[in-house]
Amino acid sequence: MSIKRVGIVGSGIMGSGIAESAAGHGFDVVLRSRAKATADGMVAGMEKSLAKQVDKGKLTPEERDAALGRVTAVSDLGELAGCDLVIESVVEDIAVKKHLFSELDRICGEHTILATNTSTLPVVDMAMETGRPDKVCGVHFFNPAPVMSLVEIVRPITASDGTIAAARSFAEACGKTPVEVKDQAGFVVNALLFPYLNNAVRLLEQQVATREDIDAAMKGGCGFPMGPFALLDLVGLDTSLAILDALYAEYRDPNYAAVPLLRRMVSAELFGRKSGKGFYDYRA
Ligand SMILES: NC(=O)c1ccc[n+]([C@@H]2O[C@H](COP(=O)([O-])OP(=O)(O)OC[C@H]3O[C@@H](n4cnc5c(N)ncnc54)[C@H](O)[C@@H]3O)[C@@H](O)[C@H]2O)c1
């Protein structure tokens, strides 16, 4: 099927990045947040991000204006009715996502593919909330979505080949490299990445080194572009904890059992960049 109009639900870090990637590659985008002011704020954020690309010479001012012109910000979920593909990117909570899928199934046309940007949760559980489990899959972007080239296309056992092919074509049309993965917690990247991030917090808790030195060690010693604490702050500590809890629930592997310090930091609302403070302070 041909995808022209894409709905994005959720106005957090990932929702805005996916919207920017799609609008920047010619898709009409309907951006839905529960509050219209938040959806409008996302468009303003996108404007800033695209302006940076113009400054860097990666985009012409005309391309920036065209991309912004393709975005409509809404608060009513009903406005997603005419979309060919809807990608939800709300909080990593299975109850919230399941409820959203049943709503989207009621609202969207029969042909619409419903996708989730979940990092770890079972896509099949969302698919089974709908009357179209064959048209549900995962389209997992990475952070920051406009920059990172990978998209994991998650195939639940219910999805049709046509749905997976359409999701793959969409990712390619956004300039991404899709990799097809099984619907298993963490897919490929997070199943491998999160034991590393969790064990970095454990080293900090055990006072093996400071957070700055652990970050410097992994950059200098492994050639990573950023250390584990800078990455946890970028991903969001609340989202990281939800990811670890989902991984642990699926595999019962102690490497996925969230280190107490991480849980305490989330209780203290130290979420990372999005709240101004996590392992580092961004409020200065
Ligand atoms: N942060 C990352 O690096 C990253 C990367 C890839 C995928 N993801 C996934 O993307 C999704 C969103 O993550 P994020 O980092 O953008 O989170 P975020 O905390 O920045 O945003 C979450 C969004 O969910 C909305 N929300 C919260 N409760 C809701 C509810 N009850 N109903 C509807 N909306 C609700 C919030 O208003 C917010 O817009 C998650 O599934 C996450 O696992 C995150």
Image: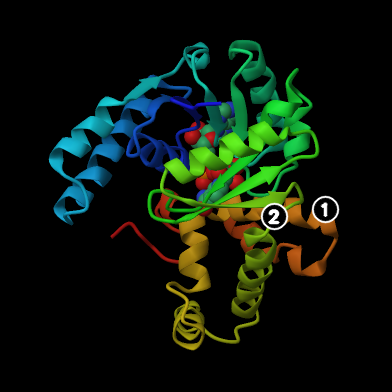
Which of 100/87 is in front? 87
Task: Give the residue at the far right of this rendering.
Answer: 252
Q: Of callouts 2 and 1, which one flags the residue occurring earlier in the amino acid sequence? A: 2
Q: Residue at x 44, y 18 (%)?
A: 75
Residue 279 spot, x, y in % from top left: 48, 66
Question: At 66% from the left edge and 17% from the top edge, which residue is drawn?
Answer: 105
116 lies above or below 256: above
- Front-most of 4 and 237? 4
Q: Quadrant of residue 220?
A: bottom left
100 horizontally vs 217: left or right: right
Residue 14 to residue 230: above or below: above
- Residue type, mark 1 in image: Glu
Name the spot of residue 106 as percent of width and height, x first.
65, 12
Q: Residue sitting at 40 percent across and 27 percent down?
A: 29
Colour pattern of the rendering: rainbow
Q: Quadrant of residue 253?
A: bottom right
Crowding around mark 2 (Cα neighbors within 10 Å: few <14, some 14 to 19, many 20+) is many
Q: Nearer the viewer, residue 98 or 268?
A: 98
- Mark 1: few/some/many CA within 10 Å (<14, 14-19, 20+): some
Label pair 2/1, CB-CB below 8 angstroms:
yes
Question: What residue did someone put label 2 on?
Answer: 186
Q: Is residue 61 visible?
A: yes
The residue that label 1 is drawn on is 250
Q: Amino acid at mark 2?
A: Gly
